[in-house]
Image (spheres, grey):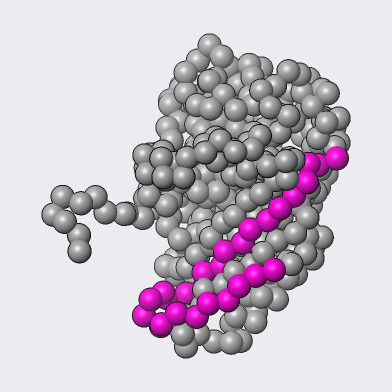
Amino acid sequence: MSGKDEKLISLAHGAGGEKMEDFISEMILPALENDSGEISLSRLDDSSVLDDVVFTTDSHTVKPVFFPGGDLGSLAISGTINDLLALGGKPLGLSLAMVIPEGDSQKKIKELLTSAADTAEKAKVPITTGDTKVVEKDDIDEPIFTTSGIAKRHPLLDKNFESAGKRKTRWLSDDNLKDGDKIIVTGSLGDHGITVLSEREGYGFQGDVRSDVAPLHEVLESGLKVGGVASAKDPTRGGLANTLNEWGKKSSVGIEVEEEKIPVKEWVSSASEMLGIDPLSIGNEGKFVLSVESSKAEEVLEAVRATRNGKEAAIIGEVKEDIEGVVLRTEVGGKRILEMPVGDPVPRIC
């Protein structure tokens, strides 16, 4: 039973952003604290590295489970593959564990499994193990998919770092940024979060309202072939604002980005304005943010744009040691601090 003064869990504790970061630092890390491996739990990257094996795990709870452009199955597989890729791994295999509410439709579960299998096949990463649990119908309202994945060090990573200059780690970790790096986003932002919200609430926003869910193996490999990529991250919960603030804090640098260069589709911008949501704080599921050695940035951009999921890629800013935090240069010529969000403004999107 909860005591009168007991602190309770809120949605914001699991939504990315500042409140989740505090929760992890104050409660989770002290309970599980260890520095095992080259990239350890305490560093709070999206994956860890043990004996050159990249490992990650994630639980996915999206409402509704089907939405334009994707579903719970494709989301779970894409998210785990992208987390492995973002640290510099070449995925080897995945697990899929399902918690299903009693009374759910077998047809629905089959559709979600087919989607998960199709997504894994496209990325050439097999689902090799898993688990199934069924719980009482009142305990959860929709299935929860938990996926884990392992990867080996990508064979292009060493060559990539030859042109990335001296870095803190030999992985694409959050703390690898340095002064002068260019910041690249591999496509338009906010598509996923606004699509799920629109489908959930029945807003009926105008435009090609579709999630960006996709595994990004081709996008990352195109950049690694060119070289100079120092860090990579998929801006899921908390969006671009959260990613850049995490990078700046862990790398002890400032970052300046230009608002007019950040790709945001018109329907995302219009919907965000109507709802009072910042599209830079909304989760994405088919985009990477890259920090790239300045001399290689244009070439990396060109290579990413040549891929299926990178056609809208853009260089949006630069790493600067002489500023603090993340600074957004606005379209009207002013500047404002792009703060880490408290949490993702759209819950249950991933």
Percent position of residue 21, x then y: 42, 40
The answer to whether one can see residue 178 in this image is yes
Q: Count every numbered label the image shows and give the total.
A: 0
**Is residue 274 left or right of 214 when viewed as pictured?**
left
**Is residue 268 left or right of 303 when viewed as pictured?**
left
Percent position of residue 258, x then y: 57, 28
Q: Is residue 119 above or below residue 231?
A: below
**Is residue 43 left or right of 231 when viewed as pictured?**
left
**Given the current orientation, which residue lies at the most extreme top position?**
322
Residue drawn at the location 77% of the way across and 34% of the way down? 301
Percent position of residue 23, x then y: 37, 44
Q: Nearer the viewer, residue 198 or 78?
A: 78
Residue drawn at the location 56% of the way across and 72% of the way down? 98
Q: Nearer the viewer, residue 63 or 90?
A: 90
The answer to whether one can see residue 315 in this image is no
Q: Check if residue 346 falls in the magenta segment.
A: no
**Given the current orientation, which residue lies at the most extreme left position?**
4
Q: Is residue 239 above or below residue 10?
A: above
Residue drawn at the location 53% of the way across and 20% of the way down? 252
**Is residue 328 left or right of 128 when viewed as pictured?**
left
Percent position of residue 141, x then y: 42, 76
Secondary structure mostly seen in magenta is strand
**Which quarter of the figure is the N terminus placed in?**
bottom left
Q: Which residues are magenta?
A: 129-155
Residue drawn at the location 69% of the way across and 68% of the way down? 129
Q: Check if residue 140 falls in the magenta segment.
A: yes
Q: Nearer the viewer, residue 171 or 75?
A: 171
Q: Is residue 200 above or below residue 45?
A: below
